[in-house]
Amino acid sequence: MTQDVKLNGLVNVLGNLEYPISRDEAAEQCDDVTLVLADGEENLGEIVADSSGETFASMDDLETEVFNLLPRHAVGEPYQSEGEG
């Protein structure tokens, strides 16, 4: 059963994993999770599988890696800042 998760709910998914965890194990456990992004969707398992890291010591390590691998359209319009006005 596929689970749709908004990007701000990523920590809830990653928090359910046991650390340290290998890239392959994390990818397998996240394969049924679809991240709902600002513009589109991405499979979390595929994102994790694309990582160059072999293992993740903590949830923070894996979360950082996922954010680094997300496509530019994941969080909204490129080069836009909500802080300017």
Image: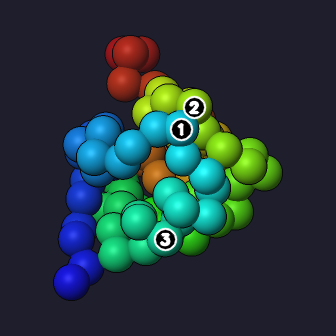
Which amino acid, by three-letter code, is at mark 3?
Glu
20 on left or right of 5: right
Foreground of the two, 73 or 85: 73
**What's the residue at 53%, 38% (across, down)?**
20
Residue at the farthest bottom position: 1
Q: Quadrant of residue 83?
A: top left
Foreground of the two, 42 or 55: 55
Image coordinates of residue 36 in percent, x first then y, are 31, 62
Residue wearing tag 2 = 57
In primary-sequence order, the first of circles 3 and 1 is 1
- Marks 1 and 2 close (CB-CB < 8 Å): yes
- Marks 3 and 1 close (CB-CB < 8 Å): no
Foreground of the two, 53 or 36: 53
Mark identifier at residue 28: 3
Residue wearing tag 1 = 20
In primary-sequence order, the first of circles 2 and 3 is 3
Q: Disc 1 versus disc 2: distance between alpha carbons?
A: 4 Å
